[in-house]
Image (cartoon, grey):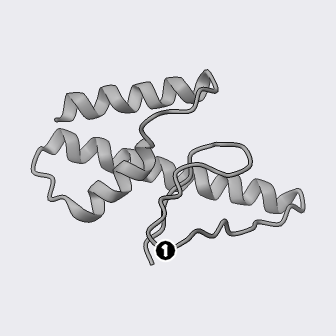
Amino acid sequence: PAYQYQLALERYEWNKVKKVKSIVPMIHVSWNAARTVKVTDPDLYRMIKYCLMTSLMQCQLLRDSLTNIGKKIIFQSRVKEEPAYYCNECEVGVSARSS
């Protein structure tokens, strides 16, 4: 499982670089796995943890950058049970938040 996760994450990052919308929203998948799956493979655990820490860091950096240039951050609401994998405006992957 760790190798498959690694390959999927690498493809996700490659798609971001090439500005191609990924079929699998890996950040969302990673957060859901961390919340719902007991990971016993130490390599997989480290990869998921690194992915989540990186996503938190990217969110904080983006938030700080937007705030510094005076942009207002707007919550993108969704209907209950509707997955929010991509931004409605720019189609960039977004993290899901549990309610």
Give the percent coordinates (x, y) of residue 31: 37, 56
| Label 1 CA crowd tier, 10 Å (few <14, some 14–19, many 20+) | few
Give the percent coordinates (x, y) of residue 39: 15, 53
Residue drawn at x 30%, y 41% as measured from the top left? 47
Residue drawn at x 59%, y 26% as measured from the top left? 20
Give the percent coordinates (x, y) of residue 56: 51, 56
Q: Is residue 75 above or below residue 24?
A: below
Q: Is residue 88 above or below residue 71?
A: above
Task: Tell which residue pokes out farthest to the right in this image.
Answer: 70
> Which residue is identified by label 1?
80
Residue drawn at x 14%, y 44% as measured from the top left? 42
Most foreground residue, 44 or 27: 27
Using the rendered view, name the quadrant where residue 41 is placed: top left
As drawn, is 2 to the left or to the right of 87?
left
As drawn, is 35 to the left or to the right of 53?
left
As drawn, is 27 to the left or to the right of 2?
right
Look at label 1 and name its amino acid. Answer: Lys
Most foreground residue, 41 or 76: 76
Most foreground residue, 53 or 22: 22
Q: Total marks drawn?
A: 1
Q: Quadrant of the C terminus?
A: bottom left
Q: Secondary structure at mark 1?
A: loop
Residue drawn at x 63%, y 43% as measured from the top left? 92
Using the rendered view, name the quadrant where residue 9 is placed: top left
Q: Is residue 13 above or below residue 88?
A: above
Q: Quadrant of the N terminus?
A: top left
Task: Tell which residue pokes out farthest to the bottom in this image.
Answer: 99
